[in-house]
Image (spheres, rainbow, N blue to C red):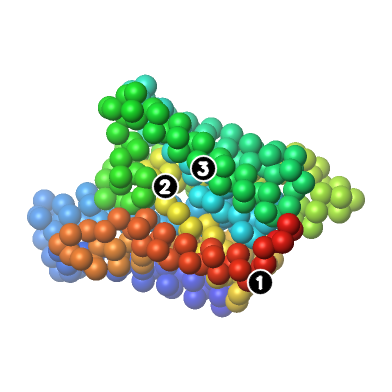
């Protein structure tokens, strides 16, 4: 319980810092002048949606990383590494090319693309022997293929601007409520479902044979959890772009001091993931102000070396 309250306190502090700090610092006294003031408009139309987007995307991607790592029995798997984010990105690009720009349409399409990508990687890795290396290599291949498909769509339909530099890197500079609200509803529903099913996820992580002996339909629950992870990733990608490594860094950091029990790990991942992305976004905003750095650049700079560290620590054998 102490770990939960500590996480909530940091979550609140990160959110408040994001709301009041930036290219133009705000103070609570300025907001008392009313919503029609310059400070009020910045707070309501820029800072509030952006902070909510950081908290939602960070929590969604972190919990999705925990789920994918447990289901695939691979601690190196994360949404961006195995192609789940790329599948959602391709779906969003196709949506833009077809002119389907509503928040619900883009979030739904992103879920479909993410789900198909994670299923394809799961089946390919199983066909290749199910080793950890097979999962990672399947994901790398999936990322390359889906990235090429996205490039093809944007070349053929230049108006499909979703795969701009900002979207590819990931960031919150262009978040609007019309896209954030539908995706946020889906994220909250998926987070609630994952938390309610934490016991089944715990059992499933022990292996399919043991899960069946304990009365859990392993195949069905595996599909359910992959669908929930895809929904979390797809909804986050629909407004945040292809943010990388959140679902790798946060789960591994939490396991160091919170253990691997899903009942504890999942809510902490939702809280700390949101706070982590919010702090990274704030640093990206403040580092070169008044210019702004996309937070995805900072996350990739942190996540790339972290992934190499995990890879070297676990060795490079066939089952590493």
Give the labeled residue for mark 1: 259
Q: CA distance from mark 3 to mark 1?
A: 30 Å
**Left or right side of 131 for 29:** left
Query: Which residue is depicted at the point 34% across and 30% down?
Result: 154
Q: Quadrant of residue 274?
A: bottom left
**Left or right side of 294 for 40:** left
Return the residue nearer the eye: 175 or 98. Answer: 98
Crowdedness near tag 3: few (<14), some (14–19) or many (≥20) residues, C-alpha within 10 Å: many
Q: Is residue 289 above or below residue 144?
A: below
Give the labeled residue for mark 2: 242
Return the residue nearer the eye: 246 or 168. Answer: 168
The C terminus, quarter of image: bottom right
User: Can you give x and y, in whole percent of width and height, for residue 19 in the image?
Assistant: 27, 62
User: Can you give x and y, in whole percent of width and height, for residue 241 in the image?
Assistant: 38, 45
Q: CA distance from mark 1 to mark 2?
A: 28 Å
Q: Earlier in the sequence, mark 1 or mark 2?
A: 2
Seen as rendered, the residue at the extreme front is 317
Q: Earlier in the sequence, mark 2 or mark 3?
A: 3
């Amino acid at each position: 319980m102490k770990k939960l309250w500590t996480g909530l306190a940091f979550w609140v502090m990160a959110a408040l810092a994001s709301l009041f700090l930036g290219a133009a610092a705000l103070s609570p006294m300025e907001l008392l002048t009313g919503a029609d003031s310059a400070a009020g408009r910045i707070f309501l139309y820029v800072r509030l949606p952006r902070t909510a987007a950081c908290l939602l995307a960070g929590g969604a991607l972190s919990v999705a990383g925990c789920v994918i790592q447990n289901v695939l029995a691979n601690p190196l798997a994360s949404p961006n590494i195995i192609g789940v984010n790329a599948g959602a990105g391709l779906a969003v690009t196709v949506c833009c090319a077809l002119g389907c720009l509503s928040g619900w349409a883009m979030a739904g399409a992103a879920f479909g693309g993410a789900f198909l990508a994670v299923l394809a990687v799961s089946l390919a890795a199983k066909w290749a022997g199910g080793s950890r290396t097979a999962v990672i290599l399947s994901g790398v291949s999936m990322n390359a293929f889906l990235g090429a498909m996205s490039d093809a769509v944007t070349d053929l339909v230049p108006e499909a601007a979703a795969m701009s530099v900002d979207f590819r890197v990931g960031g919150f500079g262009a978040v609007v409520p019309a896209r954030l609200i539908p995706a946020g509803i889906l994220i909250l529903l998926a987070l609630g479902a994952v938390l309610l099913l934490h016991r089944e996820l715990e059992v499933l992580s022990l292996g399919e044979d043991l899960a069946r002996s304990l009365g859990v339909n392993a195949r069905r629950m595996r599909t359910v959890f992959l669908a929930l992870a895809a929904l979390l990733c797809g909804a986050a990608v629909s407004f945040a772009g292809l943010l990388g490594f959140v679902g790798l860094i946060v789960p591994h950091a939490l396991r160091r001091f919170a253990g691997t029990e899903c009942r504890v790990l999942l809510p902490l991942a939702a809280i700390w993931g949101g706070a982590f992305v919010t702090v990274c976004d704030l640093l990206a905003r403040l580092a070169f102000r008044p210019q702004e750095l996309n937070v995805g650049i900072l996350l990739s700079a942190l996540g790339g070396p972290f992934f190499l560290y995990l890879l070297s620590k676990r060795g490079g054998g066939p089952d590493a």
